[in-house]
Image (cartoon, rainbow, N blue to C red):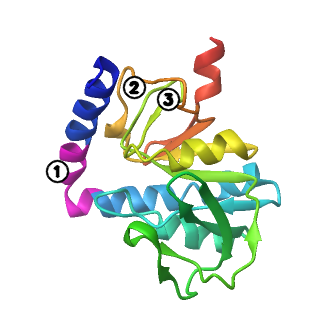
């Protein structure tokens, strides 16, 4: 295993442990704080489609945020895994609509739901830094998708405690534009240009 791969693995282990340690009251407070950011995200989406995600494992709960965005009139979509090498597509979805179990046990919209191209994409993460580097689970689905079909804005979503000084990155890792945590929304592009 290369030094970079080992550094990523170590950071993944540490951040998974950190997320598991977040208490239920902290999780509920974070979910509520994210939902209060819905008007700001709706304005950034500018009438386009926003792709969310279904939280898995110990990820921050984005369901209240997606419901708040829907109430703001934002058209929503969720990612669907096509295959290990092909990345993701996005299907239209509304809160309350039935979801089916897709690849890796992740809930996805029906295959009957129309495929859409999001203007703004919310991405789960294990760790992030202020410049917009994101550490995911290692499958590369979001990175491959962003490299092929970049939305206007890529927004990482997680707990503020998932911020680290430097995420180890390689040439395949795609930068985030913004990061949303319970502490607010910040623009990573400003840190890259400073």
Q: Quadrant of the N terminus?
A: top left
Q: Residue at x 64, y 79 (%)?
A: 94
Q: CA distance from mark 2 to mark 3?
A: 6 Å
Q: Secondary structure at mark 1?
A: loop
> Residue 56: which disc?
none
The residue sitting at 52% across, 63% down in the picture is 53
| Element under disc 3 | loop
Rendered location of residue 113, percent (x, y): 69, 81
Badge 2 vs badge 3, beta-carbon distance below 8 Å: yes
Q: Which residues are magenta?
A: 16-26
Circle on res. 167:
2
What predominant SS class does the magenta segment belong to?
helix
Whichever of labels 1 and 3 marks the residue nearer the N terminus, that label is 1
Residue 51 to residue 129: above or below: below
Q: Label 1, label 3: how many angstroms apart (C-alpha)?
A: 23 Å
Residue at the (34%, 59%) spot, across then down: 29
Which numbered tag is attached to residue 133? 3
Looking at the image, residue 166 sits to the left or right of residue 192; the answer is left
């Amino acid at each position: 295993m290369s030094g970079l791969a080992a550094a990523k693995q170590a950071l993944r282990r540490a951040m998974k442990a950190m997320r598991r340690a977040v208490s239920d009251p902290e999780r509920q407070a974070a979910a509520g704080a994210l939902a209060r950011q819905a008007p700001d995200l709706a304005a950034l989406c500018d009438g386009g489609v926003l792709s969310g995600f279904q939280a898995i494992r110990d990820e921050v709960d984005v369901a209240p945020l997606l419901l708040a965005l829907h109430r703001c009139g934002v058209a929503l979509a969720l990612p669907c895994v096509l295959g290990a090498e092909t990345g993701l597509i996005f299907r239209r979805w509304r809160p309350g609509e039935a979801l089916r179990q897709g690849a890796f046990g992740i809930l996805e919209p029906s295959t009957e739901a129309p495929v859409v191209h999001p203007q703004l994409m919310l991405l789960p993460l294990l760790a992030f830094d202020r410049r917009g580097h994101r550490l995911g689970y290692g499958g590369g689905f979001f990175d491959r998708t962003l490299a092929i079909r970049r939305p206007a804005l890529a927004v990482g979503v997680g707990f503020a405690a998932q911020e680290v000084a430097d995420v180890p990155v390689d040439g395949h890792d795609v930068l985030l534009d913004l990061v949303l945590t319970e502490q607010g929304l910040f623009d990573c592009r400003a840190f890259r240009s400073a």
